[in-house]
Amino acid sequence: MRNFIYHNPTRIEFGKGKEENIGLYMSEYGISKVLIVYGSERIKQSGLFDKVAKSLTDNGITFESLGGVQSNPLLSKVYEGIELAKTKGVEAVLAIGGGSVLDTSKSIAAGAKYDGDVWDFFTYKAVADKALKIFDIMTLAATGSEMNNFAVVTKDETREKFSLTATSVGFPTVSVINPDLQATVSNKYLAYSASDIFAHSLDMYLTATYLPEYMAGYVENILKTVMRTTEILLKDAANYEARAEFAWAATQALNFTTFCGVESNRFDTHFLEHTLSAEYNIAHGAGLSILMPAWMKWQKQFLPERFERFAKVLFNVESADAGIEALKGWYSKIGAPVSLKEGNIPEKDIPMLVDKLSVVAKMWGVEALYSKEMITTVLMNAL
Amino acid sequence: MRNFIYHNPTRIEFGKGKEENIGLYMSEYGISKVLIVYGSERIKQSGLFDKVAKSLTDNGITFESLGGVQSNPLLSKVYEGIELAKTKGVEAVLAIGGGSVLDTSKSIAAGAKYDGDVWDFFTYKAVADKALKIFDIMTLAATGSEMNNFAVVTKDETREKFSLTATSVGFPTVSVINPDLQATVSNKYLAYSASDIFAHSLDMYLTATYLPEYMAGYVENILKTVMRTTEILLKDAANYEARAEFAWAATQALNFTTFCGVESNRFDTHFLEHTLSAEYNIAHGAGLSILMPAWMKWQKQFLPERFERFAKVLFNVESADAGIEALKGWYSKIGAPVSLKEGNIPEKDIPMLVDKLSVVAKMWGVEALYSKEMITTVLMNAL
């Protein structure tokens, strides 16, 4: 195993009814005033907002609130939240929603403790090393944001979709995962979520130049769990056990446990996808299921044995190509798109996408890895 | 999955040469004076002690030291450490050694912040909720103590071997795991360590009345890793990769990740073994390999399907009994004892052991679970 540091300070409160204790959890960390961030008004109709408000009030915590966070969350909303957080003097941010809401909340938390432009943290101009405390109640399992310090935000005007760079202050203090709150997700978004978790796992598994056997087995167990539970949930959305395992697998796939001792630091499909979803505002998971098989066709030349192992372990087929086709077939079966066409992305846009991606690659100094040839090949594979 | 809390604040620094940064890590937490706790003087001959001392000095940290911790560590040594820690006003304890040294260090850390008798924390009279900060450099992989808040200590006069009850203050702040430092362990102790890790995993896996499929796969991956790497290391002690995976599997087996969502709170073989090793001062792992197959023969009646799964997944055999025999055979193969006889424990002592264990079971209020019948049967199975 390669040298590594593992340190994940987030406390997970997992299970039925846990959201009703959110005020108690926050009071344990001395919070008395919080900004609640959420997406659609559905959480008010469902009664979740009121439940949370009651728990806060019962524990002497006052709150402000900011709704309207969208998928592929926007920087303008982050600015709005920072302004509110600063004006009202809140001590913490509480996200109620999925990855987009939590990413917005993390960005607000970091921006509220920074005198400059929060976008500096997304463009390597500064590292967020101070932040308001972050809490969350997850209504969607996919991004793993509840147990890591990642946050992805899109700048409105330029459509640049970049990642926050933060120290451990970007980890939530307490994350509440109640699978029951995630049971209303549509089958379509469940498929996108499965695709997102797959990509978190496969971006590492299929690029690692050194992958300890223990870690291979660890990640394969996550992948198998996602496959099994997705298939159950598509038929039986009320299956709590499958919902719970799906949620926990999502958390594990991106809480740094999969990176321990591995030689890899690449997120190929995520790198490519962020420009896609920023440009067309498609769901992140949909962009990933379009790109994953196409990228795999490019990537297999570098790690042929890993691809054969993947094919065998996940789909019980014998070749890298058969494994890629099997994954593509599985994405189709669960209802995730597998081509640019299915994502309504016109072929004629490919040169423009290649240009945009090349600019980002250059900014990050990774143009050798993400060459025009590589990007073009992957996008053509995705037609 | 059942409701659970997961919160593990320990920072792991894993890999080659990490012990040389211990002073840096400690200074990040504001430590300026530390008590070093260790076992034999070998760490001075090997140069490890000097390396650590230099790193501390380079970072402006002064230290006291306390050696002589034995396997099955004694309360008298804990008292000695508490006295030293209090007198010298240290802010942290640094364990250099294996589980026994770390358990002693945790107990010292808790006792140094307590006005009463530290033994209160072992007899449910008090919970340790304050402690000096704990750091460690692990020279043996087995107990998982580097990433949990457990500590087991034996009271000299009564030979009671009990567990510390602590809040999160019992977790190490930073644990250094350099597999190279663990390469000098004898084959005998490697086998005992494998047996200890197996017991941490199997005590849960074979008692859980609800075991999510994800967690089953997670634990099986740990067990397979331990089997594979133990066999490599017995032949090739210098194999760094196997040593590293063995070490990481040991940590994972008892850092609370295996308990997430599981319905279980039993440590059957550990409960039985502590009295064995306290009474005869045999190695904990040796006591566990003696008891595990014997206990499994008793336990299989309650979860027959789990035992069949274990047999199939670990040894590719078809029945619970065949799985138990296969595990027993594997323990023998690696050099771990599998009977009281092999552990030099006379048959005539069984009634005395049953009596002692019954007293402990009563003290803990678990005599229904650990009945005289159960204890007698397991010990007779172990003849």
Image (cartoon, coloured by chain):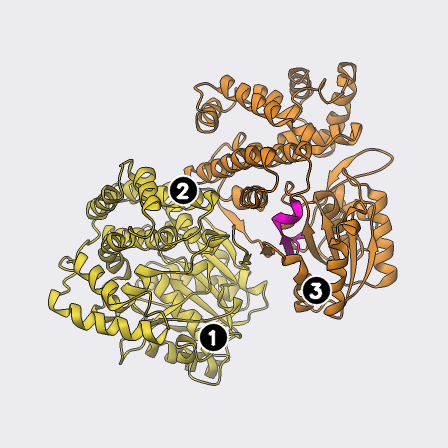
Chain colours: A orange, B yellow
Is B19 inside the magenta-drawn segment? Answer: no
Start-end of magenta stretch? A170-182
**Residue sitting at 33 percent across and 58 percent down?**
B46
What chain is tagged by disc 1?
B
SS type, badge 2: helix
Q: Which numbered circle lies on residue B110?
A: 1
Give the image location of residue B135, x and y in percent.
48, 64
The residue that mark 2 highlights is B221
SS type, badge 1: helix
Characterize the local packing of mark 2: few (<14), some (14-19) or many (20 or more) Cα atoms within 10 angstroms.
Answer: many
Q: Quadrant of residue A371?
A: top right
Q: Is residue B374 visible?
A: yes
C-alpha gap between disc 3 and disc 1 = 30 Å
Could you say which is closer to the camera, residue A271 or residue A199?
Answer: A199
Give the image location of residue A203, x and y in percent.
58, 32
Horizontal side of residue A168 vs A229, given as left or right: right
Q: Which numbered circle lies on residue B59?
A: none
What chain is tagged by disc 3?
A
